Amino acid sequence: MLKNIQEWVLLLVIFGAVSVLGNWIGYDIVAIEAIPGMLILLGICLVGLILGEIIPGSIPSIAYVALVGVLVSMPWMPGSQVIVSATNEVDLLALTTPILAYAGIAIGRSWTDFVKLGWKSIVVAVFVMLGTFLGSALIAEAILRFQGII
Amino acid sequence: MKQQLTNIWKDWRLHTVVLIIVLLTETIGTHSFTVGPGVVLLLPMLYAIIMGLALFFTPVIKDKQSKNAEPLIVLGVTVLIAKIGVIIGPSLPQIIEAGPALLLQEFGNLGTILIALPVAILLGLKRESIGMTHSVAREPNVGLIMDKYGFNSPEGRGVMAIYIFGTVFGAVFMGLISGFLATWTPLHPLSFAMASGIGSGSMMAAASGSLVAAFPDMENEILAFAGASNLLSLSTGLYMSIFIGLPITERLYQIMTKNKKYNTSESKGA
């Protein structure tokens, strides 16, 4: 557990550093301004990951990470403005770029499986998007009609 | 996540390659072009995954780097989830105000399971179909599947396939079908506005954008409903998947594949 925490911290710091540099180049936010926000995000991750380890049950640790993030940034939490304005300096897309860079490198090993999915995954993807869009629209239609809004 | 993470931080070859990819792709920046009612967005993350993949087939990346990259995806997604958490927090009051219609239409996202899972199974996909169809496969759902099944599992490959498709074509696809469906079905444009918020900013923008183009009189209402719904999908999507979507998908998958086996053995017998 302790060894895991040490490894988490080191990897989070590496990931954070790469993201802050990408954030600087891609979104024009100078590294110095983004570092406090990044440290807050990494702290939220660490707390969530540790909670996921020590709390029994099968709820994934990212659920705790999201919960901690919401709790510390909601308006009723004292000092939340500081957290919100600091983390605003880290662009969401600056985080996705390194994730997908690592993902590309990792996908290589299962590339043949991906190719096998091929056209089938495109067909399924079309139905996935159609399903959520039509499902939500039908329910919204029913309730909006019931409420007399439309 | 629970297995040993030993000394991956020392893999400087991997981290340097990723740093170079990030600096290069962010320098190229975002580009977009329009196709019909939708916009195709070319984001740095898209170039990044292609470059990473291309490098895998060069001597720069060895098998070790590729293995070591997996836990970093999981940790990276964790940072992303933390960021989404602090986006949701400040807007909690609006979310609470947003009302029952908005809340209940979130269950419509489960429609993806009912429509897409049978299709996936019919096409002969195995456990990939669980990752593919349990949700609309945006970042929180990808994180959930990685956390639960691992990156190199069939479920992980499935969710990544849909995620990649959504990242590349999601906006243009949503833009196309929302304009088309809103003009060709009897459903009200405001219902489609709420449906536009599926937890991705670019897809929401494309879907609600073409709705506005089709119904310019309702511009403000459409954008307000779509925005609120997107916020809700971002904040509830993960929990919806954990507690409802994924368990239903697992159960339905078991039922459907069992019936299929039964049918084939029956036809063999006959």
Image (cartoon, coloured by chain):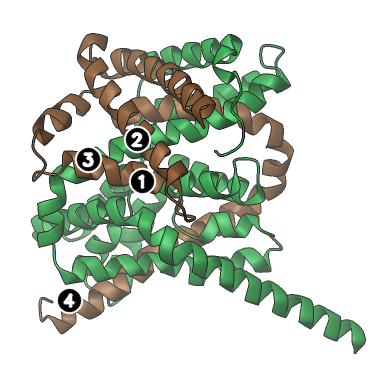
Chain colours: A brown, B green
Residue at the spot of label 2: A47
**Quadrant position of residue B51:** top right
For the residue pair A108 and A42, the one nearer the viewer reads as A42
In screen coordinates, is B31 left or right of B190?
A: right
Give a yes or no on whether discs 4 and 3 share a subunit. no
Badge 4: chain ID: A
Q: Residue B87 carries which label?
A: 3
Q: Is there a contact, CB below 8 Å, between mark 1 and mark 2?
A: yes
Q: Where is residue B109 in the image (x, y as percent from the top left)?
A: 38, 64
Q: Residue at x 58, y 26 (%)?
A: B69
Q: How far apart are marks 1 and 2 (CA)?
A: 8 Å
Give the secondary structure at mark 2.
helix
**Mark 1 / mark 2, whichever is N-terminal:** 2
Residue at the spot of label 4: A144
Q: How far apart are marks 4 and 2 (CA)?
A: 41 Å
Badge 1: chain ID: A
Q: Which residue is drawn at 59% across and 27% down?
A: B5
Residue at the spot of label 1: A64
Q: How far apart are marks 2 and 3 (CA)?
A: 18 Å
Give the secondary structure at mark 3.
helix
